Image: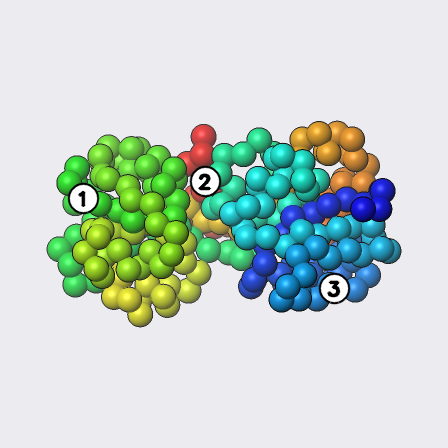
Amino acid sequence: MASGFLTVAIPKGRLFPPLMELFQKAEVLAEPLEEKSRKLILEDEESQLRFILSKPTDVPTYVEYGAADLGIVGKDVLVEAGRDICELVDLGLGFCKMVVAVPKDGPIKRVSQLGFDSRVATKYPNLAREFFNRQGLGVEVIKLNGSIELGPIVGLADAIVDITSSGQTLEENGLVPIATLGTSTARLIANPISYKMAFGRIMTIVRQLEAVLGEGGEADDPDLADLGR
């Protein structure tokens, strides 16, 4: 691959279009790149940036191990992974909340009603355990990788911990939130060695992004980073 390129791991899917729009507005890219169904590496010669398109959960791994210099990842994934990276900028994209949700017509109405014999399904076992430990609740956390909402429906779990933006998926599956663990947005992260070796170039990108990011309103809920401490 050409020398001088910075490699950026970015998530495939719904975050890609607004991310390209932000990069173009910040003049990180002259033209937005197109997400193609089978092409997993995209290059922009003018900006000397190479993009790895990956699953969101893999982005911190690519960055920590140096396969990518930079990455874009949700705070939920970042805290759950616990990788050795540098967090640089809150991009404000992909806002969502991580919640505890239970069947709307079920007996559980408060988190405190989840006892030691309760089971909670989630894609985020580390964050879930930390949350329930802080509540003094010894629930059993079950890791799932697919549709978490199925857990209570099929009797696998009494509750779920998952992210939600509009709440529509929860509602359509008869679930209702009873607690919020925190909020999440997409973050720009860097490999620690790349951050030192390419500090000037990386900080130029950081300043370009910060110049176009508006001041966000104060969130009513805590950042998920509070659970990662």
Determine if residue 56 is in view: yes
Is 67 above or below relative to 25? Answer: above
Q: Residues within 10 Å of mark 3 (few under 14, many from 20)?
A: some
Circles 1 and 2, Cβ within 8 Å, touching? The answer is no
Element class at badge 2: helix
Q: Disc 2 designates what residue?
A: 80
Amino acid, disc 3: Pro
Q: Between disc 1 and disc 2, whose residue precedes? A: 2
Residue 178 in view (yes/no):
no
Q: Which residue is labeled 3 in the image?
A: 32
Does dot 1 land on a helix, a strand or a loop? loop
Q: Position of residue 164 (x, y in %)?
A: 41, 58
> 72 or 7, which lies in front?
7
Disc 1: which residue: 118
Q: Could you tell which of marks 1 and 3 lies nearer the N-terminus?
A: 3
* In-front residue for pair 70/53: 53
Q: Nearer the viewer, residue 190 or 135?
A: 190
- Give me the residue at 62% from left, 48% from top: 72
Mark 2 and mark 3: span between their CA atoms?
30 Å
State the residue at coordinates (56%, 62%): 13
Q: Secondary structure at mark 3?
A: loop
- The answer to whether 204 is drawn above or below residue 155 in the figure is above
The CA span between labels 1 and 3 is: 47 Å
The C terminus lies in which quarter of the figure?
top left
Labels 2 and 3 touching (C-beta < 8 A): no
Residue 124, percent from left and from top: 39, 44
Amino acid type at circle 1 is Ser
Quarter location, residue 86: top right
Does 130 sit left or right of 204 as displayed? Answer: left
Residue occupying the point 77% across, 44% down: 6
Marks 1 and 2, how far apart in space?
A: 22 Å
